[in-house]
Image (cartoon, rainbow, N blue to C red):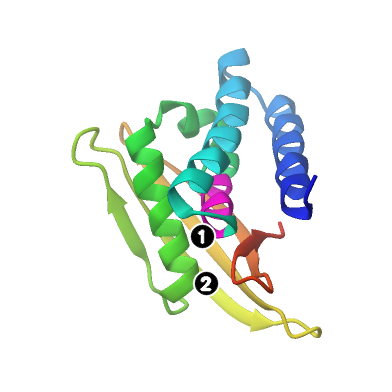
Amino acid sequence: MTATAKRLYVLIVLTAFLLAACETTGPKATVGGLGGAAAGGLLGAVLGGGGEGIAAGAILGGLLGSAVGDRLDAADRQYASQTAYRALETAPSGTSLPWRNPDSGHSGRVTPTRTYQTARGTYCREYQQTVMVGGRSQQAYGTACRQPDGSWKITN
């Protein structure tokens, strides 16, 4: 199992425990969160062609989880995943990149909030992601760091 796969697995398991701890809407919420993380990562791998796509998909699926993630269809996840990758790759800090699925009406935005270099020379980006589904907004925050192969890896 590669390091990226292990980290994705840890993210999925951690998401499961976090969602189970705050579950208020029943088992569907937990399943939606886990499914969102797994499907987002897999969709990102297919659409993004590697680590970048997996990271973007896992960002969307894992962080949006139970309340919103289970209501997003494949096209919503594609729009969000591609936007997350573009935001991490090219958007200046503080600049939001929006997405909208014209068929479902679901939308969101990804905003890198800070870019920095670690002591080891690794470039990282903190970000905020918001998704709107049925008039309800859900936000997630995280950090992704650039890997030697150019992909982005979620670090928290």
Residue 24 in percent (x, y) is at 61, 21
* Left or right placement of residue 72 versus residue 113 in this view: left
For the point 70% across and 45% down, which residue is it?
8
Q: List the residue tagged with mark 1.
A: 128
User: Local crowd at mark 2 within 10 Å, few (<14), some, or many (≥20)?
Assistant: some
Q: Picture coordinates of residue 118 (x, y %)? A: 75, 81
Check if mark 1's residue and mark 2's residue have beta carbons within 8 Å: yes
Residue 127, position as x, y percentages in the image: 54, 64
Q: Earlier in the sequence, mark 1 or mark 2?
A: 2
Q: Which quarter shows the C terminus?
A: bottom right
Three-letter amino acid code of the residue under disc 2: Thr
Bounds of the magenta span? 52-59
Question: Which mark is on residue 29?
Answer: none
Q: Report which residue position mark 2 lands on.
A: 113
Mark 1 residue element: strand
Q: Report which quarter residue 152 is drawn in.
A: bottom right
